[in-house]
Amino acid sequence: MNPNLKRAIEKAGSIALTGHKHPDGDCVGSCIAAYRVIRKMFPQKTVKLYLETIPDNLRVFEDEAAIDSTFSAPDEPFDLFLILDCSSEDRFPCAADMVKAAKHTFVIDHHMTNTHFADEEVVVADASSTCEVLFDLLEGEELDAETAKALYLGIVHDTGVFKYTACKEHTMTVAGKLLSAGVDAQKIIDDTLYRKSFLQNRLIGYALLHSQLALDGKMIYTKLSLAEMAEFGATPADTEGIIDQLRLTRGIEVALFAREDEKDTYKLSMRAIADVNVASICSTFGGGGHRLAAGCNATGDFDDILTQVSALVMLQL
Ligand SMILES: [Mn+2]
């Protein structure tokens, strides 16, 4: 294990872990893997794992029951708070107070937009995923099949199954080692990524049916309003996969999916093919991410938001 991380854990009697809001595969995978390793190496320590309710497709871990989604704080602040896959402090609102109270904070992350908010950090901006960063930090430790599965999950999800440019030779080497540790790749990929519920398939169909082209066919966008989400009985997690399907539209350079999370507050997910940097577009709304995959929140009327985003895209085309 990385000596800095090990020292931070050794010094702490009580340790908590968290990841970002709306947990995704990399967030859940890295949190579960770190939780398992710390529990195994330091069984005498108090270890708590805080995450918002995880989406159904990611409920594939033995340790799921250990996740505290109520964010109940203990009387004493934690000695160490590990924060995984979070680029800034507003990414973990439910744990924010506990993190502030913690005696020491340690971030493990891979976002180039990371704001360096913790006491200690390992941020590898060109790594495919937090799980890849974590794997390297765990060097020398024996990983059981369940821990390997968690790390594999994060890599697979954050690389779009090994296809994004952030997936490098090293990523594949790490994935290969995880296979050797006993990961059932087909099962984890199908179960967590490709298998959709009936509701999700209907939601994807609906969102695609209502998608529109803009900027001479260079941009595709679609949105789901609060009312539409309610009509389907859908949660934010049910919209996963929509942006990926939009991105596959022939001829486009940019894809935008907007989900209304509160009245006139939209979660924007953006993807680019090659020439547009969507991280920079999202950062003008206070969000961030990667060059070809980014997100942010935007408030106001959707048509106004769309006009602003289109103008920013046009500047780059
Ligand atoms: Mn990630």
Image: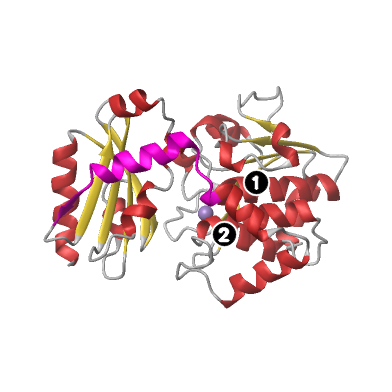
Q: Is residue 202 magenta?
A: yes
* Disc 2: residue Cβ within 8 A of ligand 1's nearest atom: no
Q: For the magenta stretch, what is the residue range?
A: 193-214
Residue pictured at 19% horizontal, 42% vertical: 305
Tell me the quadrant of the picture where the N terminus can be found. bottom right
Amino acid type shown at disc 1: Cys
Instruction: Pick the residue in front: 293 or 90.
Output: 293
Q: State the image coordinates of residue 54 (x, y, percent, origin top left).
A: 57, 36
Predominant secondary structure in magenta?
helix
Q: Quadrant of residue 169?
A: bottom right
Q: Is residue 213 left or right of residue 93?
A: left
How packed is label 2: few (under 14 Cα within 10 Å), some, or many (20 or more)?
many
How packed is label 1: few (under 14 Cα within 10 Å), some, or many (20 or more)?
many
Q: How far, Cα to Cα, is label 2 from label 1?
A: 15 Å
Residue pictured at 28% horizontal, 32% vertical: 265
Residue pictured at 39% horizontal, 54% vertical: 244
The reply to whether residue 279 is in sight is: no
Amino acid type shown at disc 2: Val
Q: Is residue 255 left or right of residue 164?
A: left
Q: Quadrant of residue 140?
A: bottom right
Image height of 100 relative to 141, above or below: above
Q: State the image coordinates of residue 147 (x, y, percent, origin top left).
A: 74, 53
Tell me the quadrant of the picture where the C terminus can be found. bottom left
Secondary element at image label 2: helix
Residue pictured at 57% horizontal, 52% vertical: 26
Disc assigned to residue 287:
none
**Which circle's residue, 2 or 1, is located before the other in the chain?**
1
Image height of 181 relative to 33, above or below: below
Q: Which residue is mark 2?
A: 156
Q: State the image coordinates of residue 279 (x, y, percent, origin top left).
A: 33, 58
Disc assigned to residue 31:
1
